[in-house]
Image: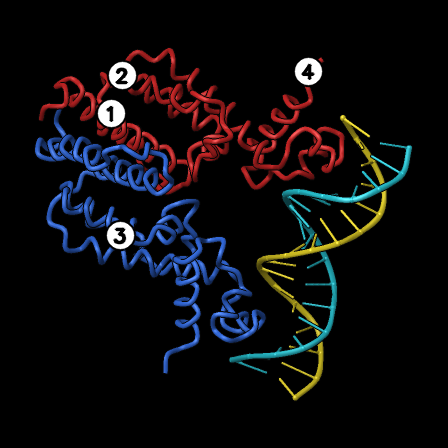
Chain colours: A red, B blue, C yellow, D cyan
Amino acid sequence: MSERPGQIVDAARTLIEEGGSAALTMRALGERLGIRAPSLYKHFPDKGAVEAQVIALALRELANALAAADSLVSLAEAYRAYALAHPHLYRLMSSGPLPRHLLPAGVEEAAALPLVRAVGGDPDQARAVWAFAHGMVILELDGRFPPDADLDGAWHAGLTTFAALVRDGGRR
Amino acid sequence: MSERPGQIVDAARTLIEEGGSAALTMRALGERLGIRAPSLYKHFPDKGAVEAQVIALALRELANALAAADSLVSLAEAYRAYALAHPHLYRLMSSGPLPRHLLPAGVEEAAALPLVRAVGGDPDQARAVWAFAHGMVILELDGRFPPDADLDGAWHAGLTTFAALVRDGGRR
DNA sequence: GTCTATACCCGGATAGAC
DNA sequence: GTCTATCCGGGTATAGAC
């Protein structure tokens, strides 16, 4: 009963989660669905459209994972946990240009909202905290920190300072 | 008088700066040097070896650009300036796994040193500041911030907090 | 909406002559 | 150390039959 487009996006998501963005090819996607690659073009105009739907799905999922957080620290924990649980998906949604014209309206904003609220609405602070969190996560995923690095310590060092900033209302 | 390997790495660097990592192909590289792609394999075992040398070169260049900075703020300015001046090169050296076994010893550490010194030697703080700076830069390069975002403001918001952390010796 | 066949382009890399 | 010829693999996408 499920619709073909939905099945295709789900299969694409699985391919990416298993093997990274490069694993999403029209041939592999068709194979996983038991059809031939050319048939996919009856449902999506091109590969980019499929990929964009996976990104939209991931952004919604992330927004959902962040919704329950009620503090900067718990927000950061949820953010990191999602990224570590879905490394390839996180990379896809957070790296390179966003195909905004292919995304449903509001998806990007919804993913950003929890953070903006957590810092009290200041856009500069929200962007700074976002950059910190993204940097920590992507450097961890890319294996850029030394193997013995205490990442909890680094997160703590960053978060306590940002928390102080928020507490002071940005006046320092 | 210049050596072939050096010429090859320089040409590879130029290709990447002009067209991103994807523009570095053995064929394009040969063409730029006026030789055929197969000839390159007399000088390098494979493409990865060429790429690694470009990364090493970029890391040394970055380390050099940061050496003069004498404060957290000036360090951040130099870091951002280098990334914006060489976006593709910065992406290459900062994203994805580092081919450490192909890099000359000490190159990675040399690039990190100015930051470690600037925060007074605390590794957690250094990693937190690095994550913030990398996040700011890569999100800017990827066009992830709104076009009208005040990035100077976001940098300032982050840097002042980190500066306070450093000033307090990490006790907050 | 699925198929087969295929066009088209691109990549890394090797063999062997000179 | 350069060349030509070539292998081998992979990708997106289209045409046209069913």
- Alpha carbon distance from label 1 to label 3: 25 Å
Quadrant in which the N terminus of chain B appears: bottom left
- The residue that label 3 is drawn on is B82
Q: Where residue B39 appears, x then y in whole percent?
A: 55, 74
The disc, 4 or 2, on the residue closer to the chain's N-terminal end is: 4
- Alpha carbon distance from label 3 to label 4: 50 Å
Q: Chain of mark 1?
A: A
Of residue B72 and residue D12, the one placed in the foreground of this image is D12
The answer to whether mark 1 and mark 3 are in CB contact below 8 A is no
The local secondary structure at tag 4 comes to: loop
The local secondary structure at tag 2 comes to: helix
**Label 2 packing within 10 angstroms: few (<14), some (14-19), many (20+):** some
**Label 4 packing within 10 angstroms: few (<14), some (14-19), many (20+):** few
For the image shown, how many numbered marks are present on the structure? 4
- The residue that label 4 is drawn on is A2
Which dot marks residue B94? none
Residue type highlighted by circle 3? Tyr
- The residue that label 1 is drawn on is A123
- The residue that label 2 is drawn on is A118
Of residue B63 and residue A61, the one placed in the foreground of this image is A61
The local secondary structure at tag 3 comes to: helix
Q: Residue at x 68, y 37 (%)?
A: A28
The answer to whether mark 3 and mark 4 are in CB contact below 8 A is no
The disc, 1 or 2, on the residue closer to the chain's N-terminal end is: 2
Residue type highlighted by circle 2? Ala
- Alpha carbon distance from label 1 to label 2: 11 Å
Of residue B80 and residue B118, the one placed in the foreground of this image is B80
The answer as to whether the residues below labels 1 and 3 share one chain is no
